[in-house]
Image: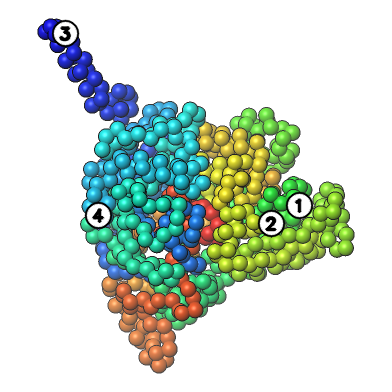
Amino acid sequence: MTRSTLGLVFATLLAWSAVFALPAAAQDPNVKPVPAIAMHGEPKYEPDFKHLDYVNPDAPKGGSVVFGALGTFDSFNPYTIQGTPGPGASYETLTTSTLDEPFSQYGLIAETIETPEDRSWVIFNLRKEARWHDGKPITADDVVYTFDILKEKGPPFYQSYFASVAKAEKLGDLRVKFTFAPGDNRELPLIIGQMPVLPQHLWKDRDITQPTLDIPDGSGPYKLAKFEAGRSVTLQRVPDYWGKNLPINIGQNNFDTMRYDYYRDGTVALEAFKGGAFDIRLENSAKQWATAYQIPAVKDGRIVREVIPTEGRNLMQGYVFNLRKDIFQDRKVREALQYAFDFEWSNKTLFYGQYVRIRSYFGPSELGSTGLPSPEELKILDPYKGKIPDEVFTTEYNPPKTDGSGDDRANLEIASKILEDAGWKIENGVRTKNGKKLDFEILLDDPAFERVTQPFIQNLGEIGVKAHIRSVDTAQYGKRMDQFDYDMTVNLVAESLSPGNEQRDFWSSKSADTTAGRNLSGIKDPVIDALVERVIAAKNRDDLVTATRALDRVLQWGFYYIPHWNAPFDRVAYWNKYAHPATMPKYGLTYETWWFDPQKQATLQQKAAAAAAPQGGSQPAAPAENQSPAPAENASVAATPPADRGSTPMPYIIGAVVVAFVAFAIGRRGRKQ
């Protein structure tokens, strides 16, 4: 080999080594690594931010907190649709969101993020200091393994989202790239950032599809300390947690221990709280808030009741029709039954006037439709004329209204006429058409909803519709919901301030046939499918708002839900030994920023002693630090209601730590009564 040939070979090898050594972003000088990305526009917090605006950066660490939860648990694996998971897993995501902006993602396990203008791919550069609880580093191998296993064997939620990812590849020990399938889906880099990361070395010999109480350690600020199956879970703060000094975490994760005690009965849980068995209670019942806290511990300040305002609580809660049942395929039936629910009477008589009526799937924010369609909305909707209800173009949607007196004759006459005109005649006391009777079951998992549903059923009877309640326990309810085995039920769909890919889960034709999917109404409408894709493809905030309003109008006039109620606040009761920042997050409640206050604890115990003295000890004492009693024998226990299985920490508005193990989302928990 000549010297010139050697030189050519050497130069070629150098060139190839340089190519392979270059980071992917270096091949595109326009793509720079950034610590955070926003769905539209720029993230709120600058790259050099010190802490979030709604934390106390000097919050002390220490103390314990006990939460009460309804239901039970038989697993700590949230990545399977089998079993009922409790809060034992401690897996973090590549990025994390905040509660004071619509939708931004900040690096957590990932230090920086790279994505081009068209967002056709994303690269995550992992933090070299990120560690599992056993001390091993978190690597790109863990990320790729997690993606592959969740896409192949995870819940439908992950399989649906990850179907848009063409390839996941390791570019280096701390560098991983996701390439997306062609199409307009600008949300995907943020969605992939929300993927939890599992330790490959601890999961590779396990079956992720099976429920288990032997959950491998993760990387988060807490780890499982102990549990009593079905009754109680205790999490211990990890003192050498690798991410404790990240700006995104400053002022958070302040309790040394968090315990979740499970109760099967809501009344027992309430009395347990008032007796000091657990510390903080998120009250979902207007009646309980108005009547159940008239006790000495509240009057003398040992228990604090606080109404905490929140914005952007966009949700649809209501009676949901299962369109898989023939009788509910008729839109006129769904329309008529709207007139049998008297919200104004319920709010006045049952809810002490605490609620407002829901009228939009995405309101009350700017995303909800009002008035008639704008010119921009009409550009989207006009091509579907004749395929969607005419009212979309001519009438602002509002649910039926009464004067609250309980005299519903006017609305029931309207309902009767709609049914008559649609061919539903009364035969032997029941509306009947072509041999089919309007006779159905309303499936509930919470007895508190019976007091609302019974008057609704009574009104239905007045118009010849026969309905009856079926209440079941949480486990049976979950199984029946997963199989869509119901006629009508109560559901809550929590929407973020930046709707996107999750809309496929909620409304798409494909989701309607997916076991354990979230399209509970069973909608199969190609127009809605197209509008969902339009929301996902929105290139800026204005486009997103316009597309979401168009989708909202079609959902409203489809009468898929009988809307319930909403409130712009959270009701929290807690024993007065805790403190929280003066500035609370704008878009949801979180206990991650609260802390234990020893001085308040001392005052609490003094008040308890003073209250007990003249009563011979009959008053509830202050809960002793780290010694909160377990729930009563007859109330088998589990932490807050389990989350929608496998759901990612999307910025859905209901955001307490308790709710972090609930759903979010997303789903069938956290409903207001």
- Give the spatial CA distance, label 2 vs label 3: 79 Å
In the rendered image, which quarter is residue 303 located in?
Answer: bottom left
- Image location (x, y in percent) of residue 506: 57, 46
Nearest to the observer: residue 329 or residue 81:
81
- Give the spatial CA distance, label 4 vs label 1: 56 Å
In the rendered image, which quarter is residue 46 located in?
Answer: top left
Q: In the image, is residue 606 above or below residue 150?
A: below
Task: Point out which mark residue 487 bears.
Answer: 2
Looking at the rendered image, the quarter that the N terminus falls into is: top left
Q: Amino acid at mark 4?
A: Asp
Residue contact between numbered discs 2 and 4, judged by CB atoms under 8 Å: no
Q: Amino acid at mark 3?
A: Thr
What is the crowding at mark 2: few (fewer than 14 residues within 10 Å), some, or many (at least 20)?
many
Task: Point out which mark residue 327 bears.
Answer: 1
Residue contact between numbered discs 1 and 3, judged by CB atoms under 8 Å: no
Please tell me which residue is depicted at 65% across the width and 45% down the height of the picture: 523
- Give the spatial CA distance, label 2 vs label 4: 48 Å
| Dot in front, 4 or 1 | 4
Q: Amino acid at mark 2?
A: Asp
Residue beneath disc 4:
134
| Dot in front, 4 or 3 | 3
Residue beneath disc 3:
5
Please tell me which residue is depicted at 61% across the width and 67% down the height of the picture: 472
Mark 4 residue element:
loop
- Give the spatial CA distance, label 4 vs label 3: 52 Å
The mark that comes first in sequence, 4 or 1, is: 4
Q: In the image, is residue 500 above or below residue 452?
A: above
